[in-house]
């Protein structure tokens, strides 16, 4: 084989190698893109969306969902801190899940009356943070029931008078049985 033949063979090998590598590069890029696409929802699933609101009295409610909107199906650790009127501070308070629904948390009455800046944090692995302004109000008691007037029926007064007759009948039956038992013993002795 001549030097030119060796050069042609080596050139053909290098061209084939270059074509193979250039064809594999888009496949590798596609694989990297697929891995990145899978990592994005996984990273999104590791974050929480926290919705903070007042409970209408002196507490705070929190609805926790995944950042993509899915319902939270596990218990997470949520910590509440709040700054209120005149620099008052509350917290950190660890919140417990409530039976009202999945991902629902409530603080109970921890705030005094006034406007509060409330922050709720969730540490890793499901990280999330939310801040809201909450108006705390004194707890309201239910209104007293209206008085009910007691009246006696005037049109149907005779319908409630049956019970004395029933009682008298029971006394007569008991007396008759007692007499029968008394006379029954005398005959056998």
Image (tube, rainbow, N blue to C red):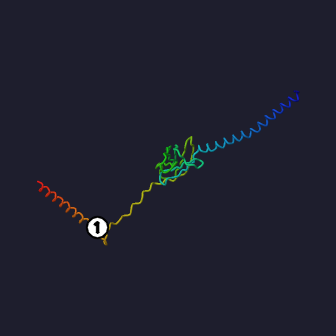
Left or right position of 146 against 1: left
Under tag 1, what secondary structure? helix
Image position of 13 with respect to 178: above or below: above
**Where does the image place residue 97, in percent across and percent down from the top left?**
49, 46
From the viewer's side, name the closer residue of 92 and 22. Answer: 22
Q: Residue furthest front?
A: 188
From the viewer's side, name the closer residue of 95 and 16. Answer: 16
Left or right position of 71 against 170: right
- How crowded is the residue under tag 1: few (<14 C-alpha within 10 Å), some, or many (20+)? few
Instruction: Please say whether residue 160 is visible from this viewpoint.
Output: yes
From the viewer's side, name the closer residue of 99 and 92. Answer: 99
Image position of 7 with respect to 97: above or below: above
Q: Residue at x 45, y 54 (%)?
A: 139
Q: Residue at x 61, y 45 (%)?
A: 44
**Where does the image place residue 30, in percent across and percent down from the top left?**
71, 41
Q: Quadrant of residue 149?
A: bottom left
**Where does the image place residue 71, in percent across and percent down from the top left?**
55, 49
Q: Residue furthest bottom?
A: 155
Left or right position of 29 against 43: right
Q: How many marks overall?
A: 1
Residue carrying label 1: 160
Q: Residue at x 14, y 57 (%)?
A: 184
Q: Residue at x 44, y 56 (%)?
A: 140
Instruction: Please say whether residue 78 is visible from this viewpoint.
Output: no
**Where does the image place residue 26, in percent across and percent down from the top left?**
74, 40
Q: Quadrant of the N terminus?
A: top right
From the viewer's side, name the closer residue of 50 and 11. Answer: 11
């Amino acid at each position: 084989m001549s030097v030119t033949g060796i050069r042609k063979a080596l050139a053909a090998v290098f061209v084939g190698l270059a074509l193979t590598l250039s064809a594999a590069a888009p496949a590798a890029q596609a694989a990297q893109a697929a891995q990145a696409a899978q990592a994005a929802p996984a990273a999104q699933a590791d974050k929480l969306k926290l919705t903070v609101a007042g409970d209408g009295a002196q507490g705070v409610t929190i609805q926790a969902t995944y950042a993509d909107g899915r319902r939270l199906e596990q218990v997470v650790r949520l910590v509440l801190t709040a700054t209120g009127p005149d620099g008052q501070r509350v917290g950190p308070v660890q919140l417990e899940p409530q039976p009202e629904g999945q991902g629902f948390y409530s603080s109970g009455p921890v705030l005094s009356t006034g406007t509060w800046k409330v922050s709720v944090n969730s540490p890793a692995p499901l990280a999330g943070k939310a801040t809201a302004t909450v108006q705390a109000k004194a707890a309201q008691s239910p209104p007293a029931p209206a008085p009910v007037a007691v009246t006696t029926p005037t049109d149907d007064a005779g319908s409630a008078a049956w019970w004395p007759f029933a009682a008298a009948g029971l006394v007569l039956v008991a007396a008759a049985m007692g007499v029968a038992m008394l006379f029954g013993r005398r005959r056998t002795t």
